Amino acid sequence: ALLVGAAAPDAGKWCAEKIGLKSEPGTATQGSAQVLTLKDHRTTVQLWTLPGLGHDWPRTNPINATDVIWNFFKRHPKR
């Protein structure tokens, strides 16, 4: 399936649904970032959206994306 033109939160929900996650999304803010989280007892999907950043990979302010993804995988090891 191809997903074109969807807003980031809608794309995150679509991806989560495709892998079988049916939970209602949780949202939170971390600095200026919006964090969408969908999970069940085995799987967690997170989508971080930073206003005005587009598809950039932030390395400093407001977040360091490398640290965020590394910490995510440390908290959610492959089973």
Image (spheres, rainbow, N blue to C red):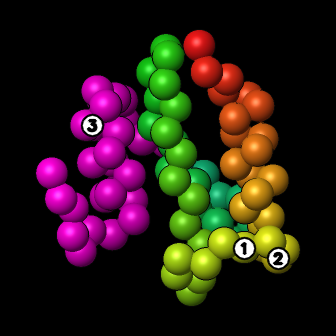
Above or below: residue 1 compared with residue 42: below
Label 1: which residue? 58
Q: Secondary structure at mark 2?
A: loop
User: Which residue is pictured at 66% across the width and 27% down the height?
Assistant: 76
Contact check, label 3 and label 1, Cβ < 8 Å: no
Q: Secondary structure at mark 3?
A: helix
User: Which residue is pictured at 32% across the width and 45% down the height?
Assistant: 15
Q: Residue furthest right?
A: 60
- Quarter of the image that includes the C terminus: top right
Magenta stretch: residue 18 in it? Answer: yes
Contact check, label 2 and label 1, Cβ < 8 Å: yes
Earlier residue among tags 3 and 2: 3
User: Which residue is pictured at 74% across the width and 52% down the height?
Assistant: 68
Viewer-proximal residue, 79 or 68?
A: 79
Above or below: residue 59 compared with residue 30: below
Label 3: which residue? 17
| Magenta region, residue range | 1-26
| 25 left or right, relative to 15 | right
Q: Secondary structure at mark 1?
A: loop
| Badge 2 density bin: few <14, some 14–19, many ≥20, Cα 10 Å | few
- Whether residue 51 is visible, yes or no, is no
Earlier residue among tags 3 and 1: 3
| 29 left or right, relative to 3 | right
Badge 3 amino acid: Glu
Q: How much space separates mark 2 and mark 1, taking CA atoms?
A: 7 Å
Q: Nearer the viewer, mark 2 or mark 1?
A: 1
| Badge 3 density bin: few <14, some 14–19, many ≥20, Cα 10 Å | few
Label 2: which residue? 61
| Badge 1 density bin: few <14, some 14–19, many ≥20, Cα 10 Å | few
Q: How much space separates mark 3 and mark 2, taking CA atoms?
A: 31 Å
Q: Nearer the viewer, mark 3 or mark 1?
A: 1
